[in-house]
Image (cartoon, rainbow, N blue to C red):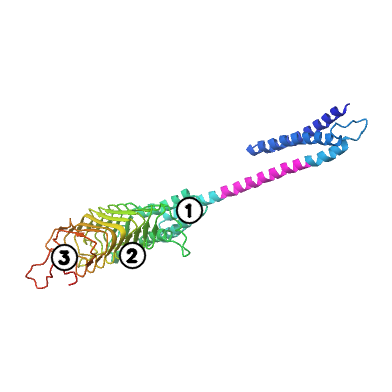
């Protein structure tokens, strides 16, 4: 047998042995990864064959060894080839071990997901329980589950949890509320559950102490047609931006319910949808809220009739627009004070933003005292039934118009006592000349009637 034939026989034997090992791997690992292992084995066999021939040629100084001259020529070749085969086998073992680890991790992941979904079913059952205490526990458990999904990066599953909380808030009460003094324990318990849902949402829309973004930033909160009653529903200091959507279209406050947005911030591409809402009962407050960064909030067809209607110290800046279109301000709620409360716009600051009242009815007194107009637009095309005060207002810049203000009763007038106006600002209005102390003016026979333009009286 010639040396070439001998080499081929040895290579064939090695090939058969390695192929047998590969076959066993393929039999045990029938998934996709098994074929990858098979490809690695075949590549290794080819490499081993080349290595064998290469070692043989190397030992023969470029020529294949002659068995007559060196009967033991194959021994050093095999000595070099066998470790190569061992290395190949080790590589296959490592690949299989990695595969097993990945399979184990996938199984663990599946178990975690299954456990999270089982928790969702448990939470849903708790929210449907007859006991208010169990429902309350379900609210907190569902919020914690949403947090867990969010931490895992699964926003879709987190949104499902948030949707369930919002759906509960939208669901009508089984026992509608009556006078607070006549509430049953069941009604009191349900009120606690509903105000807690509002507070949980609020807590997840407030930046952390370290300045990190709110935990639920960028999610949608579908509270359209929800009824906020029986207590204070807190949304104080929430941040609505970065794609966050708070949908309050056609929502209502009634039976003592107060919706609070004190210190809230609305900016950028965050959305507050509040069209056609009705604020009776306790009412609504936006005290200290900030509208900025091109955000647009339209209070279109909104009814303000609660005990509290406050926009005190609101800031409208950086291209933001706050518009009241065909809205109505009055205090006809059955829980309103005997004397109608005023609509409070004290200390509003407009700095590069727009505040607009278009065809809006003010059926109760409104106070814009110490309003500071720095830049932007104030358009006051409202319809007045009661006095509206701009006492000590400062008009330092921007566009200001009262040209289309309507006076629909003998009690309706604008009051500008103590207001100041920059020489660069032209205030449009139905009066002639400079900004009056009051419009329409009182009778000239009234000794307290100041002269037109006397803003410091």
The answer to whether residue 114 is left or right of residue 371 is: right
Q: Which residue is mark 3?
A: 436
Residue at the extreme top: 1
Depth check: give the residue in front, 195 or 343.
343
In the rendered structure, find residue 372 and report the number of the disc placed on it: none
Neighbour tally class for label 1: few under 14, some 14-19, many 20 plus, Cα within 10 Å = some
Disc 3 versus disc 1: distance between alpha carbons? 66 Å
Quarter of the figure that contains the C terminus: bottom left
Residue 332: x percent and y percent? 21, 61
Question: Do the numbered discs 3 and 1 sit on residues whose CB atoms are within 8 Å?
Answer: no
Q: Quadrant of the N terminus?
A: top right
Q: Nearer the viewer, residue 262 or 424?
A: 424
Q: Residue 212: percent from the left, percent from the top?
A: 47, 60
Mark 2: secondary structure: loop
- In space, the residues marked 3 and 2 are separated at their CA atoms by 29 Å
Q: Nearer the viewer, mark 3 or mark 1?
A: 3
Of pointers 3 and 1, the one earlier in the residue sequence: 1
Given the current orientation, which residue lies at the most extreme right position?
69
Disc 3 to disc 2: CB gap under 8 Å: no
Marks 1/2: CA–CA distance: 40 Å
Question: Of residues 221 and 266, which is closer to you in this image?
Answer: 266
- The residue indicated by pointer 1 is 122
Magenta residues, as a range? 86-111
Foreground label between 1 and 2:
2
The residue depicted at 69 percent of the width and 43 percent of the height is 95
**Does the rendering let one see residue 99?**
yes
């Amino acid at each position: 047998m010639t040396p070439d034939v001998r080499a081929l026989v040895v290579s064939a034997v090695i090939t058969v042995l390695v192929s047998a090992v590969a076959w066993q791997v393929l039999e045990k690992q029938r998934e996709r990864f098994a074929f990858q292992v098979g490809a690695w084995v075949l590549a290794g066999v080819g490499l081993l064959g080349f290595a064998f021939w290469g070692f043989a040629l190397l030992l023969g100084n470029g020529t294949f060894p002659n068995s007559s001259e060196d009967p033991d020529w194959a021994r050093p070749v095999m000595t070099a080839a066998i470790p190569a085969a061992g290395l190949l086998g080790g590589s296959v073992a490592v690949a299989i071990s990695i595969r097993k680890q990945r399979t184990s991790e996938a199984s663990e992941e599946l178990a975690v997901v299954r456990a999270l979904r089982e928790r969702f079913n448990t939470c849903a059952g708790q929210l449907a329980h007859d006991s208010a205490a169990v429902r309350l526990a379900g609210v907190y458990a569902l919020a914690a589950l949403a947090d867990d999904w969010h931490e895992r990066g699964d926003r879709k599953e987190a949104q499902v949890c948030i949707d369930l909380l919002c759906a509960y808030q939208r669901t009508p009460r089984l026992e509608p509320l009556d006078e607070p003094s006549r509430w049953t324990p069941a009604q009191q318990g349900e009120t606690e559950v509903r105000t807690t849902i509002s507070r949980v949402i609020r807590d997840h829309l407030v930046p952390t102490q370290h300045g990190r973004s709110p935990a639920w930033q960028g999610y949608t909160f579908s509270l359209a047609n929800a009824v906020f009653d029986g207590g204070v529903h807190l949304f104080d200091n929430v941040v609505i931006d970065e794609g966050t959507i708070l949908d309050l279209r056609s929502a209502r406050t009634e039976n003592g319910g107060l919706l609070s947005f004190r210190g809230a911030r609305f900016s950028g591409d965050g959305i507050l949808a509040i069209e056609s809402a009705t604020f009776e009962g306790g009412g609504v407050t936006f005290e200290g809220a900030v509208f900025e960064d091109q955000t647009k909030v339209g209070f279109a067809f909104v009814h303000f009739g609660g005990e509290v209607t406050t926009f005190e110290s609101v800031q409208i800046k950086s291209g933001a627009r706050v518009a009241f279109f065909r809205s109505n301000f009055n205090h006809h709620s059955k829980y309103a004070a005997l004397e109608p409360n005023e609509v409070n716009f004290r200390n509003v600051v407009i700095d590069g933003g727009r505040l607009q009242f278009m065809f809006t009815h003010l059926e109760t007194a409104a106070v814009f005292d110490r309003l500071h107009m720095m830049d932007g637009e104030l358009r006051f095309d409202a319809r007045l039934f009661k006095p509206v005060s701009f006492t000590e207002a400062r008009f330092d810049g921007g566009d200001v118009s009262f040209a289309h203000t309507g006076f629909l009763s003998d009690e309706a007038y604008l009051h500008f006592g103590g207001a100041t106006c920059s020489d660069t600002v032209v205030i449009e209005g139905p009066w002639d000349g400079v900004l009056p102390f009051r419009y329409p003016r009182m009778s000239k026979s009234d000794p307290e009637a100041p002269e037109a333009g006397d803003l410091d009286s």
